[in-house]
Image (cartoon, rainbow, N blue to C red):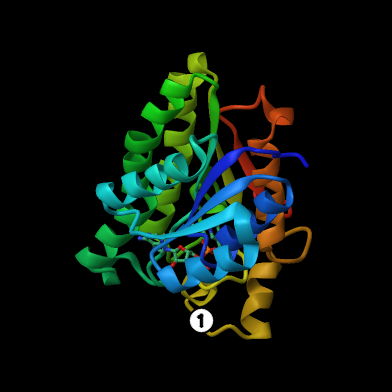
Amino acid sequence: MRLKDKITLVTGAGGGFGEGIARAYVREGARVVVADLNGTAARRVAGELGEAAIAIEGDVRLGADVQAMVEAAVQRWGGLDVVVNNAGTTHKNQPMLEVDEAGFDLVFDVNVKSIYWMMQAALPVLRRQGRGGSIINIGSTAGIRPRPGLVWYNGTKAAVNIMSQCMAIEVGPENIRVNSICPVIGATGLLEQFMGLPDTAENRAKFLATIPLGRMSQPSDIANACVWLAEDASSFITGILLPVDGGRTA
Ligand SMILES: NC(=O)c1ccc[n+]([C@@H]2O[C@H](COP(=O)([O-])OP(=O)(O)OC[C@H]3O[C@@H](n4cnc5c(N)ncnc54)[C@H](O)[C@@H]3O)[C@@H](O)[C@H]2O)c1
């Protein structure tokens, strides 16, 4: 049990990578707040995980909702040790001028402003406890080695990556660690939008050709990295951008 008794909060945990992270956390002994815009999905995941999980429906674009996610952890289990800012979205892969203002605002609000709200809500709790903490942001290889057609999305992930490093410097003296995990493309609900193409074997092959290990990322890959960055074994690791990418950014 690598995360025994750690109190964790995972956003976007109703599916995709976030569900995989929540499942791995419970398997390793943590308690987890499963937060998602899709309340039905959050309740399904938490229900399957049993006593160690609770569901909360909320929108990471809204400060009050993010506050409620943190309060859910504090009320249910008395504190908070680990936050995974995983909820994210993208615009369709397309030329940059075809993304309208609403599409631009959506990706920046969900992927970037959410982290502002989460720090506003979680940092005071971590500071009050005085036992450190681990913030894990799901960035992307998109913020390191961008693909065409995703200009604004790539910009959000570059922001997530650099914000993670800057936050790590600022809160390091309080033993609060902040790291960014950078997955390569994975077969989640966002896949077709990332590819801008139907999900066929032929279209997948174009992306696989750019990944030395020859496959897409899976929720378990991201979850394994999230377990490591949450556990005490990574207590000297902060401010890193950790590609989980089969060599894509090498
Ligand atoms: N799938 C990939 O190829 C890939 C690659 C690199 C990074 N990422 C990142 O991984 C993270 C997880 O994405 P995924 O691929 O699992 O996608 P997904 O669509 O399968 O899951 C995202 C989850 O976030 C939730 N969500 C969306 N908007 C929300 C909001 N405003 N408030 C609360 N919850 C919200 C959704 O309901 C969904 O359950 C995202 O940050 C994404 O950018 C994904």
Q: Point out residue 196 in the picture as x, y percentages from the top left corner.
A: 47, 76
Question: Position of 90 compared to 4: left or right?
Answer: left
List x then y, in percent, for residue 135.
Answer: 52, 36
Determine the image quadrant of residue 36: bottom left
Locate the C terminus and report the quarter of the image it occupies: top right
The residue lying toward the viewer, choosing from 175 and 209, is: 175
Where residue 195 appears, as percent x and y from the top left, is: 52, 73
In the rendered image, the vertical position of residue 200 relative to residue 23, given as above or below:
below
Element assignment for label 1 = loop
Task: Name above or below for residue 231 compared with residue 190.
Answer: above
Question: Is 228 displayed left or right of 81 in the figure?
Answer: right
Above or below, 190 against 161 in this view is below
Q: Which residue is mark 1?
A: 197
- Could you tell me residue 68's position as x and y percent? 34, 48
* Residue 248 in view in this figure: no
From what the image shows, is residue 155 above or below residue 120?
below
- Image quarter where the N terminus lies is top right
Q: Residue at x 51, y 56 (%)?
A: 54
What amino acid type should be assigned to the residue bearing mark 1?
Answer: Leu
Q: Residue furthest left?
A: 101
Is residue 188 visible in the rendered image? The answer is yes
Q: Give the residue at x 57% y 55%.
A: 53
Q: Give the residue displayed 63% in from the left and 61% down from the top.
A: 50
